[in-house]
Each structure stands twice: as structure tokens, then as C-alpha cells.
Image: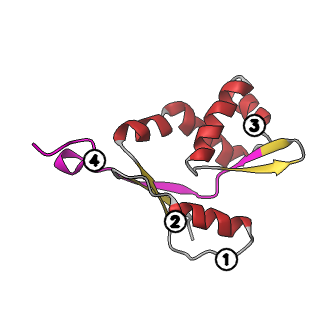
Amino acid sequence: MTRTLHVRINSSSDRSDLEDTLAALDAGESVDPKPSTLSVEDLETFGRIFRPVNLELLEAIADHEPSSIRELARIVDRHPPEVTENVTELADYGLIELEQHGRAKRPVVWYEEIDIDLPIGQHSPDVAPA
């Protein structure tokens, strides 16, 4: 079964489902097969989170399973402080987990695909009714 992270654009951020799922996984508990959902506040935030440098990091983490942020920086050929900043943002939004391995933090992607619900037109949270 493919593990999917569902992302939707809402006017209010609700990460409770995702946070519950991550906490259960951390505790070694079995998780319901229902997909986790990440609600993003607006299109501007969505664009910041899913900008190309972050997508490159997500792909590198999934493909190479680096043992540390420093190793991830080597994989993507970027400076570790820049990668750390992006990785922290991804972790803050629940897109990756950071597992402690000695003094290093190992970035982990727990899903295999991202499904995005992106409203357009009058249904977009960025557009106020006239």
C-alpha cells in the first residue's frame, strides 16, 4: 500500500491529523490506513513550502536516505546551513521527520507520494468574495 500525504489549501491550518499520525509512528503504534492530511494556510505558504529547493530535498531524502543533514547537503551540493534551514521548515510543517542519531539528525520522508488539493477561482482561500 502506498503511503500518501494529502495536502490541501485552507484558510485555517489544521495539522492535527498529521501530528497524530507522526506521534503514533514514533511510538511504534500501528497507524490507520487512512491517509494523513496537511492543511496549508494559503497559496503563498504553499508556494514557499513546495518551492523547487524543498522539493529537491524531499526527493533526495526519499531516494538516498541520508544519515544526517550534512550528508543531505553533500547529496544536493549545497551548504549545510542553507540545507538545515530548509530541512527545519519541512520538519515544522510535518513533511519530514528528524530522527536523532547520536549528534546528527537524520531527515526521513515517511510517505511515498503527495496528493495536492489546490482550489482555484472563487473557491481559492486567497480570493475574497466581491
Helix, strand or loop at label 3? It is helix
Q: Is residue 24 above or below residue 102?
A: below
Residue 101 percent coordinates (x, y):
86, 49
Q: Mark 1 belongs to which amino acid?
A: Ser
Q: Earlier in the sequence, mark 1 or mark 2?
A: 2
Q: Earlier in the sequence, mark 4 or mark 1?
A: 1
Residue with the most extreme right position:
102
Q: Are marks 2 and 3 in contact (CB under 8 Å)?
A: no
- Where does label 2 land, which residue? 17
On the image, the x and y values in percent for residue 76 come to 67, 30
Q: Which mark is residue 30?
A: 1
Gap in Å between the C-alphas at discs 2 and 4?
Answer: 20 Å
Residue 111 visible in the picture: yes
Q: Which residues, given as a range, are shown in magenta?
A: 106-130
Q: Is residue 72 above or below residue 80?
A: below
Residue 77 appears in the rendering: no
- The local crowd at label 2, few if under 14, some if 14 to 19, many if 20 or more residues have their Cα within 10 Å, is some
Q: Are marks 3 and 1 in contact (CB under 8 Å)?
A: no
Q: From what the image shows, is residue 118 above or below residue 33?
A: above
Q: Residue at x 35, y 40 (%)?
A: 43
State the residue lying farthest toward the top: 79
Q: Amino acid at mark 4?
A: Pro
Considering the image in quadrants, where does the C terminus appear? top left
Q: Secondary structure at mark 2?
A: helix
